[in-house]
Image (cartoon, rainbow, N blue to C red):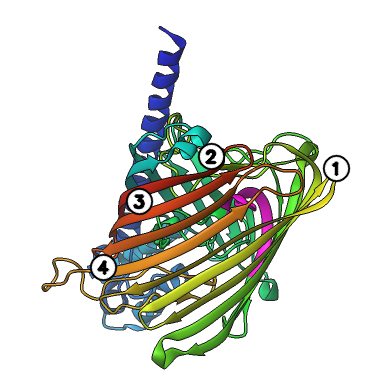
């Protein structure tokens, strides 16, 4: 059998194994939950007569300590009941002893909580290019693809520890590990401690869930800064959740499985945010934030790359090429600075970020590379885009009248964004890109969304000049 056939077979076996594992894990937890229901105790039943206990009685005090207290109370009642016959008392004692054994089993079955969820995004993209764009990038093929297909599970362990694991099946080649971390929430004023592979606290749009983005992709500056890395960090809210802070340390060069191999390469990321102005009665709020990231380059090499604001299928040859690329640059370290501004007022919302990368080049001094975007949107059907205080981000619009429910049409939103990045500085010829995008978002309900986007990209490269590329994108998204 050819090697590539063996690899394909192995990948399919991986998918089957992961799917079976998730299925049996879910079934196992369902069985445990059924046991807990079966072993639950009704205080009324125990108080009246333990011999009439039924495992199907509804549990009003689910904690094992409360169950033990109820059983003990029932024993005392039985001992004080002088009109019960000796036979009845013996039967009652035997039943209560059995109940005590079952409660002990219930305590031993104490387990973490587990929630299984996921989503998929199906995209279609079409491109038109002028002659300069074709010379710069080649002929960009139209495409249809699953941009993301993800499963994730998360929950709590012993009340003070949370966990999350997320796999993506849309990346070509194999399932890829994205989020995989544990978080301890009992550190007092220090908030929570997170360890693992997760999104670093840097950038408002980076910390927004990919299912809740206003546009199909993040802005151009996404390529300028850390994202998911292997690290550890603290985070908390203050002033009645009106302000937040977070700080992490991480290793660079993390692959799709959360591994970072090799000497050197580390960084720090910090973010502070606050609500500058708020009038709840008018659904008005202004958010400000500041972020910093320091990266000590692995092997003294620096690189920034960025696709336009539509990327096609992940890691698939023949899809959307990289528009901006500095190439490998000799640099000892880089500091990233990021400013955030966001606001909501009834059905209107806006968001903007300004970012600079200060690259300490070897023998060239410090080079400053800028990136910026501003976007705004309006919900035609009257809904409000909410603000989430703990992550300090804007969330997705939820239709007040879902599509197909009592004549509802869902929620319809119009939005526009201008985005830019300049990598033609300090001896670098990475390109300069300006991109203007317009989008219509149709939220059918809180689980389904349709997006139609048009985007115009203006790319300037030192040798080829300015090329114009028009991009048309449709997306269908479902959460489950």
Q: Residue 204, located in which quarter of the rendered image?
A: bottom right
What's the residue at 51%, 56% (across, down)?
219
Circle 1 SS class: loop
Q: Quadrant of residue 401 in the image?
A: bottom left
Q: Nearer the viewer, mark 2 or mark 3?
A: 2
In the picture of the structure, the residue carrying the numbered disc 3 is: 119
Q: Identify the residue under disc 4.
A: 53
The reply to whether discs 1 and 4 touch (Cβ–Cβ < 8 Å) is no
Q: Quadrant of the C terminus?
A: bottom left
Labels 2 and 1: the sequence-earlier one: 2
Q: Which mark is residue 287?
A: none
* Distance in Å between CA atoms under marks 4 and 3: 44 Å
**Residue at the spot x=26%, y=75% of the render?**
45
**Relative side of 86 to 303, left or right:** left
Q: CA distance from mark 1 to mark 4?
A: 79 Å
The image quarter in which residue 233 lies: bottom right
State the CA–CA distance, disc 2 to disc 3: 26 Å
Q: Which mark is residue 362?
A: 1
Closer to the camera in the image, 430 or 47: 430
- Callout 4 crowding tier (Cα within 10 Å): few <14, some 14–19, many ≥20: many
Judged by depth in the image, the label closer to the viewer, 1 or 4, is 1
In the image, residue 306 lies in the stretch drawn in magenta: no
Query: Would residue 230 be seen by someone viewing this image from the given angle?
Result: yes
Residue 116 lies, in percent from the top left, at 38, 52
The answer to which of marks 1 and 4 sits earlier in the sequence is 4
Q: From the image, tell me which residue sits under label 2.
A: 322
């Amino acid at each position: 059998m050819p090697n590539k056939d063996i690899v394909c077979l192995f990948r399919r076996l991986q998918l089957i194994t992961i799917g079976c594992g998730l299925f049996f894990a879910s079934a196992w937890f369902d069985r445990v939950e059924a046991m807990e229901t079966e072993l639950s105790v009704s205080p009324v039943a125990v108080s009246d007569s333990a011999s009439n206990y039924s495992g199907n009685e509804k549990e009003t005090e689910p904690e094992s300590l409360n169950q033990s207290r109820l059983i003990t109370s029932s024993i005392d009642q039985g001992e004080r009941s002088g009109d019960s016959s000796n036979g009845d008392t013996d039967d009652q004692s035997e039943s209560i002893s059995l109940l005590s054994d079952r409660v002990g089993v219930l305590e031993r079955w104490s387990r973490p909580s587990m929630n299984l969820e996921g989503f998929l995004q199906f995209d279609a993209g079409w491109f038109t290019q002028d002659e300069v764009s074709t010379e710069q990038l080649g002929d960009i093929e139209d495409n249809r693809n699953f941009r993301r297909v993800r499963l994730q599970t998360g929950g709590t362990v012993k009340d003070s520890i949370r966990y999350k694991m997320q796999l993506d099946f849309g990346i070509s080649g194999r399932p890829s590990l994205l989020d995989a971390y544990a978080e301890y929430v009992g550190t007092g004023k220090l908030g929570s401690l997170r360890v693992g592979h997760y999104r670093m606290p840097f950038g408002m749009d980076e910390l927004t869930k990919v299912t809740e983005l206003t546009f199909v992709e993040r802005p151009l500056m996404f390529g300028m800064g850390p994202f998911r890395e292997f690290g550890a960090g603290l985070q908390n809210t203050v002033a009645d959740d009106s302000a937040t802070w977070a700080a992490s340390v991480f290793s660079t060069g993390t692959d799709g499985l959360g591994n970072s191999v090799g000497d050197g390469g580390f960084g720090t990321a910090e973010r502070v945010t606050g609500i500058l102005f708020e009038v709840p009665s008018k659904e008005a709020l202004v958010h400000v934030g500041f972020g910093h990231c320091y990266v000590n380059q692995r092997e003294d090499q620096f690189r920034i790359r960025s696709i336009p604001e539509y990327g096609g299928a992940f890691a698939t040859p023949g899809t959307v090429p990289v528009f901006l690329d500095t190439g490998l640059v000799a640099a000892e370290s880089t500091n990233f600075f990021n400013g955030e501004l966001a606001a909501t007022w009834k059905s209107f919302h806006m968001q903007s970020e300004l970012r600079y990368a200060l690259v300490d080049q070897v023998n060239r001094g410090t080079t400053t590379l800028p990136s910026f975007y501003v976007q705004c949107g309006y919900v035609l059907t009257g809904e409000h885009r909410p603000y989430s205080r703990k992550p300090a981000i804007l969330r997705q619009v939820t239709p007040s009248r879902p599509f197909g429910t009592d004549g509802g049409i869902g929620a319809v939103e119009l939005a526009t964004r201008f985005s830019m990045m300049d990598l033609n500085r300090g001896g670098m010829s990475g390109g300069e890109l300006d991109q203007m995008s317009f989008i219509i978002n149709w939220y059918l309900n809180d689980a389904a969304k349709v997006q139609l986007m048009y985007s115009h990209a203006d790319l300037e490269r030192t040798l080829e000049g300015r090329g114009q590329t028009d991009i048309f994108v449709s997306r269908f998204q479902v959460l489950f």
